[in-house]
């Protein structure tokens, strides 16, 4: 499989070539040259398969430069019930992404049963094993540098801990994450994991990462890499659970299913779009945002207007607090019939801090043909949805899942199953659950008292020079 750039000016590459990288050389995102589609017969043959078998069926089409036996081993090592063990119904952990049925045609797809209790574990755990494999083959090593406000950093650390050839340097804003999130990351004692608490906000940490990455000589000398959400391997690994859910809620091929996705960087729902392009009969892709509604605005009006950081709200579904959606370019590429020149023009505006407006173009009308609809929610909506879900179904959901469940309600159709992607467990967001329900959510076993564990973290100023010196001292 060849991968091309959305901007059309990079040479095609293979899966392993783009695995460790970020953007393509021309600043675009990697896309498969064409979608490897599944016929209805091929789809039907997948019904009833286990999660690892489905993952192999999907990913072997994208990663065809990894020998099949190796890929199978990596997948089997990743998708084990012992790793994704925090299912509501423990007996169903073997499903890896079990469903909780709320009503006959309304389901939650449990994606947050992995070690960090958020859906990012679904793809990141595979990435850890893929990175180790790829680095071993070439004898290289990689130093992952990132900034996190919570979920991504912990998912990356739990995926990379103990992996040969990989070190993680993760910057987080000192004192800004919840005590639970801090404990999750800082209590890791693995020698290849380095937590750096930066005196400042998330944006300060992000700026330091950018400054270090822009020092190309340092970047090359110390093999600095990233694991951000534009990574193609992450997106493709997320396609798998759309297949798993589809078979779980249908009886025969051809039946349609809708999905509702709490969205930030457009990674998760982009995987849904890809699943649909592969031939999975997805009716609607319901995109849900919180008050940071840049994507909802686009799907309603055709205007894509990334916000400045000053315009970005801090909300009670913080993992969706984005100002621009880094994976969105992939969908716009498809929407424009893969016209890379058109993409370059649109993103010339975006990269210069501007916006674009498709409302007067034929593309705006075509959005519907891709199944996308959208909506947004407020803090009050989230509280009301968390309450109603507890009352009606006896189930506690997290604020991100609540965003999606609220928006999904407006897009349900008789006879069409609606699957709401559950992207975090409520234990991660105690404060909001307390506000909604008057009591703290249950913690999965093994997470009680983690705040009291010894922590391993270095506090520093948001200064690129200091961070570089720290990295150099720990790599050499
Ligand atoms: C990252 C995250 C999201 C947003 O996912 P995207 O792929 O960025 O759209 C939603 N919910 C939770 C809990 C997350 O961690």
Image (tube, grey):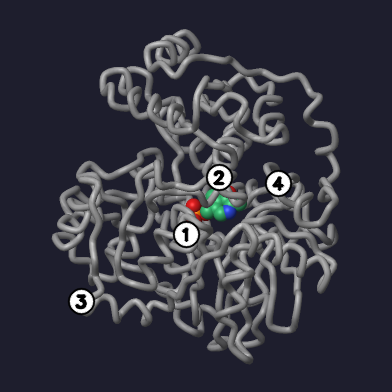
Is there CB contact under 8 Å for labels 1 and 2? Answer: no
Q: Nearer the viewer, mark 1 or mark 2?
A: 2
Q: CA distance from mark 3 to mark 4?
A: 41 Å
Query: Does the beta carbon at disc 1 come under 8 Å from ligand 1?
Result: no
Q: Residue at x 51, y 57 (%)?
A: 291
Which numbered dot is residue 429?
4
Q: Nearer the viewer, mark 3 or mark 1?
A: 3
Element at label 3 = loop
Residue 333 locus on image (x, y percent):
27, 64
Q: Nearer the viewer, mark 1 or mark 4?
A: 4
Which numbered dot is residue 44?
none
Q: Residue at x 57, y 71 (%)?
A: 407
Q: Is residue 159 above or below residue 351?
A: above
Q: Is residue 333 above or below residue 301?
A: above
Is there CB contact under 8 Å for labels 4 and 2? Answer: no
Q: Is residue 358 above or below residue 233?
A: below
Q: Quadrant of the C terminus?
A: top left
Q: Quadrant of the N terminus?
A: bottom left
Q: CA distance from mark 3 to mark 2?
A: 39 Å
Q: Looking at the image, tell me whether mark 3 or mark 1 is earlier in sequence order.
A: 1
Q: Looking at the image, tell me whether mark 1 or mark 2 is earlier in sequence order.
A: 1
Which numbered dot is residue 124?
2
Element at label 2 = helix
Q: Residue at x 65, y 61 (%)?
A: 380
Which numbered dot is residue 360?
3
Q: Is residue 451 left or right of residue 203?
A: right
Residue 470 in sight: yes
């Amino acid at each position: 499989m060849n991968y091309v750039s959305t901007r059309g000016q990079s040479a095609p590459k293979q899966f392993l070539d783009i695995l460790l990288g970020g953007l393509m050389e021309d600043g675009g995102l990697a896309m498969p040259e064409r979608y490897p589609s599944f016929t209805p017969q091929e789809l039907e043959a997948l019904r009833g398969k286990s999660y690892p078998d489905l993952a192999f069926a999907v990913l072997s089409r994208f990663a065809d430069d990894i020998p099949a036996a190796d890929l199978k081993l990596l997948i089997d090592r990743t998708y084990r019930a012992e790793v994704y063990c925090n299912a509501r119904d423990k007996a169903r952990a073997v499903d890896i992404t079990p469903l909780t049925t709320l009503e006959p045609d309304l389901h939650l797809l449990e994606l947050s049963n992995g070690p960090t209790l958020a859906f990012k574990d679904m793809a990141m755990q595979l990435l850890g094993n893929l990175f180790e494999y790829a680095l071993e083959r070439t004898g290289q090593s990689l130093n992952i540098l990132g900034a996190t406000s919570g979920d991504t950093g912990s998912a990356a650390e739990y995926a990379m801990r103990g992996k040969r050839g990989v070190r993680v340097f993760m910057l987080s804003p000192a004192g800004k994450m919840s005590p639970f999130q801090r404990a999750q990351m800082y209590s890791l004692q693995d020698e290849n994991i380095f937590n750096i608490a930066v005196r400042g906000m998330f944006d300060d940490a992000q700026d330091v990462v950018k400054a270090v990455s822009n020092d190309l000589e340092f970047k090359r000398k110390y093999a600095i890499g990233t694991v951000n959400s534009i990574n193609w391997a992450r997106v493709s690994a997320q396609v798998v659970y759309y297949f798993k859910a589809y078979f779980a809620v249908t009886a025969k091929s051809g039946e349609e299913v809708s999905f509702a996705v709490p969205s930030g960087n457009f990674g998760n729902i982009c995987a849904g779009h890809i699943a649909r392009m592969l031939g999975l009969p997805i009716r609607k892709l319901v995109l849900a945002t919180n008050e940071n509604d840049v994507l909802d605005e686009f799907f309603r009006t055709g205007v894509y207007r990334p916000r400045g950081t000053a315009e970005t709200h801090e909300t009670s579904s913080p993992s969706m607090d984005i100002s621009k959606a880094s994976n969105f370019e992939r969908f716009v590429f498809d929407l424009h019939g893969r016209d890379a020149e058109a993409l370059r023009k649109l993103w010339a505006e975006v990269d210069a801090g501007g916006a674009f407006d498709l409302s007067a173009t034929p593309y705006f009308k075509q959005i519907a043909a891709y199944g996308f609809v959208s909506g947004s929610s407020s803090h009050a909506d989230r509280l009301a949805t968390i309450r109603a879900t507890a009352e009606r179904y006896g189930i506690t959901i997290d604020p991100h899942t609540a965003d999606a469940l609220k928006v999904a309600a407006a897009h349900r159709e008789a006879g069409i199953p609606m699957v709401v992607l559950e992207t975090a467990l409520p234990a991660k967001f105690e404060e909001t659950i307390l506000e909604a329900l008057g009591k703290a959510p249950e913690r999965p076993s093994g997470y009680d008292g983690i705040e009291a564990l010894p922590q391993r973290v270095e506090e520093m100023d948001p200064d690129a020079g200091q961070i570089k010196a720290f990295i150099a001292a720990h790599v050499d």
